[in-house]
Image (cartoon, rainbow, N blue to C red):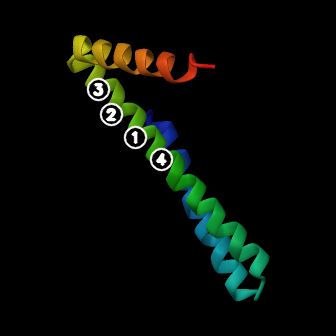
């Protein structure tokens, strides 16, 4: 995850918080809800980017283990989805 992605996610989260507060002040449940959704989306994006970085790090640290796991997952997927 680049620094720009982190900053973008944090900015979206802050904008969502501001929108939620505006909705509360204006007694607008629509704006309040949209603000909460925007915050949740920013947090989810941050979590997904963090998980991707974790997987990248683990695969760089142990490429053979990662290859074995990927092969195992591929084998299981072929067994599950190949039985039509």
Contact between marks 3 and 4 (CB within 8 A): the answer is no
**CA–CA distance in space, label 2 to label 1:** 6 Å
Residue closer to the observer: 53 or 11: 53
Q: Nearer the viewer, mark 2 or mark 4?
A: 2
- Residue at 70% x, 73% y: name it: 33
- Give the secondary structure at mark 4: helix
Q: In which quarter of the image is the C terminus?
A: top right
Q: Which residue has dot 1 on it?
A: 50
**CA–CA distance in space, label 3 to label 4:** 17 Å
Q: Is residue 76 above or below residue 33?
A: above
Left or right: 78 in relation to 24: left
Q: In this view, does 25 lie above or below 2?
A: below
Q: In which quarter of the image is the N terminus?
A: top left
Q: Earlier in the sequence, mark 2 or mark 4?
A: 4
Contact between marks 2 and 3 (CB within 8 A): the answer is yes
Q: Which residue has dot 2 on it?
A: 54
Q: Earlier in the sequence, mark 3 or mark 1?
A: 1
Q: Which mark is residue 57?
A: 3
- Give the secondary structure at mark 1: helix
Q: Which residue has dot 4 on it?
A: 46
Contact between marks 2 and 4 (CB within 8 A): the answer is no
Contact between marks 1 and 4 (CB within 8 A): the answer is yes
Q: Where is residue 70 in the image (x, y as percent from the top left)?
A: 37, 17
Q: Which of marks 3 and 4 is nearer the N terminus?
A: 4
Residue closer to the observer: 55 or 81: 81
The residue sitting at the front extreme is 84
Q: Where is residue 39 in the image (x, y as percent from the top left)?
A: 58, 62
């Amino acid at each position: 995850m680049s620094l720009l992605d982190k900053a973008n996610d944090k900015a979206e989260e802050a904008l969502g918080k501001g929108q939620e507060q505006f909705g509360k002040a204006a007694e607008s449940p629509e704006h309040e809800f949209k603000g909460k959704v925007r915050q949740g989306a920013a947090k989810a994006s941050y979590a997904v980017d963090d998980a991707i970085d974790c997987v990248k790090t683990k695969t760089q640290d142990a490429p053979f283990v990662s290859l074995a796991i990927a092969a195992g997952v591929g084998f299981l997927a072929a067994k599950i989805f190949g039985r039509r």
